[in-house]
Structure formats: C-alpha cells, structure tokens
Amino acid sequence: MSVKPKAAHPAPSDALQRRSVKPVICYPTETLPRPNIGAYQALRGDLELIETVVIPPREAKTWEVPAGHFCRMVCTEGPQVGDLNLFNLHDLSERFYSGKTRALNGTHVGVGDQLFSSLPYLRPIATITYDTLDWYGFDEFGGSVHDVIGTRCDPYTHNLLSHGGQYHHCCHSNLTRALAEKTGLTLPEAEPHVHDVLNVFMCTGFTRDTGQYFMKASPVRPGDYLEFFAEIDLLGCMSACPGGDCSAEHSSDTAACYPMIVEIYRPREAPAGWKSPTVNGYDRSHGT
C-alpha cells in the first residue's frame, strides 16, 4: 500500500486536456549506432568454452571477459535471480550505467540492446546476443525480465525497513566482498565502485496505480541463459540474490536460493566489421 497522501487540490477545469498531451520519447534512437546483431550471432555456432564460474547461493563472484568474447549467465538447479555489475577490466571508474542504458533501451533489456558505461566514457561495453526468456515480453501486470530499473538489495535499505536489522548477504554486500577479493581493495575502498545493476532473470515492473517498483516470481528455469558479447575487456561481478526467484522477498535466509553459472566463450573470429568502441567523443570543455 502506498503511503503517498491523497491529492490536496481539486483537478482544474482543463485537467483532461493536460493529461491527454501525447508523450515524447526523451532520447530518439534512430541515429544511435546499432550493432550488426546478425554478425554477432553468426559466430554462436562455433564457440569454445574457456572458463566456467560457479556463483554460490547468497554470494557473488567475479570473472573476466576479454573484448570479442561471449559471456553466458546460466540458470542451473532452480529459479534464481542475479545482480550484475560490469567494469572496464583496466579502469574501475568506467562501469555499467543502468540509468543511461534504461533511457536508451527501455526498462528491460533483450537481444540487440547494448549496455552503456558511465560518464564521461559513455560507450557500449556489452551487447546482448541471446536470451532464452525472450518469449516472456510484458505480462498483464506490466512485468518483464532483465530489468535496469531496480538498484540492488542492500543492507542500508534493509536496516531502514527492518527497524535496525543487520543482514550481510544483500547483493550490495555480496558484490562488495567479491570485488574486494578480486582487486585487493579494502571493503571501504571497494564499496563505492559497486553500482546499480542489471537484474538478470528478475521479473519486475511498476504498479499502474501507485507507480511502485514490484517484483514477482521469475519465469527462469534450469537451462535458461542470458548471453552478451564483450565490446571491451570486462570485469564481471554477479550476486546470486538472497531472494532466490524474488517471488516474495529479498534479503532473506529463508527463500529458496540456487547457484548460478557463468560461462566464457571464445569465438573463432571477430564479428564481421567489428571494432571495440572508443570512449565517447564529447570534448569535455563544458562550454568553457
């Protein structure tokens, strides 16, 4: 139930006219450079598996994906949601930017969508090439999978909502520990690098009456996977969410949780015409 107060002011005489104004897309993408998805997918029939990473339930792990390689995030033993962070392998300050990815692609991502990096770099760092859940679309509640609207479950919000509770396996904490272990940073040093995620397999949306972010049981099943192509050298970090399939709650030690698998594949060659994207071309003068 929303705690927002009821409107304090009566609707004006032209309320219907104001509400009926047609929306305008904020970022028209007709001129946005698009990947040749066919060239990427043409390589999928001859891939060499070079690494497998197992992410235990309620934990996170890191892995590296060289530019020009494919990465699959796989559901294994049962329905499980993963919270994904991506970094430039050589520079943690360049990281996945969920807000701009959402603005350019929509609330949920799928095949052909690109994941963009943070300012001032703002370039595609990964391209989604395959999704076994592409059949889901949007359901009657407005829910869909692989969202870039949520943040990540974190111990600070849990503390607020539970009146002081201390829970250490929220995805934020899992990602922080895994990144610290990988990089040698201390926990306080690693934590600021953890950022808003791609919620892999999570089924989410906004309620139509109150506009609240909702989650529901993920439709993912063992064998399903989401695959992306690395546009630059990437460091991946993913948490197997303590909410399991997020059908009821997260930040939980009681939800059924399962491991996830990450697989790295090397193609026989680069996609036709492919070049790793350069950083954004804005001159950074900011009008001076």
Image (cartoon, grey):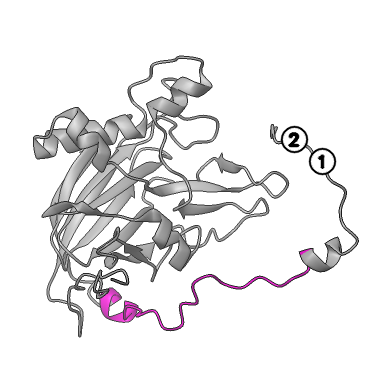
Amino acid type at mark 2: Pro
Q: Start and end of the magenta stretch? A: 19-41
Residues at circles 1 and 2 in contact by the CB criterion of under 8 Å: yes
User: Would you place residue 150 above or below residue 253 in this image?
Assistant: below
The percent position of residue 116, horizontal first and vertical second, equals: 32, 63
Identify which residue is drawn at 14% across, 29% down: 186
Q: CA distance from mark 1 to mark 2?
A: 8 Å
User: Is the residue marked by circle 2 packed among few (<14), some (14-19), or many (20+) residues within 10 Å?
Assistant: few
Residue 19 appears left or right of 35: right
Tell whether position 30 is magenta. yes
Q: Give the structural element (helix, strand or loop) at label 2.
A: loop
Identify which residue is drawn at 24% across, 48% down: 262
Residue 13 appears left or right of 65: right
Front in this rendered view, residue 163 or 129? 163
User: Is the residue marked by circle 1 packed among few (<14), some (14-19), or many (20+) residues within 10 Å?
Assistant: few
The percent position of residue 95, horizontal first and vertical second, equals: 26, 53
Q: Quadrant of residue 282?
A: bottom left
Identify which residue is drawn at 38% across, 45% down: 222
User: Would you place residue 122 above or below residue 91 in this image?
Assistant: below
Check disc 2 and report the residue beneath it. Answer: 5
Q: Give the structural element (helix, strand or loop) at label 1.
A: loop
The percent position of residue 193, horizontal first and vertical second, equals: 24, 42
Q: Is residue 255 visible?
A: no
Disc sitting over residue 8 in the figure = 1
Amino acid type at mark 1: Ala
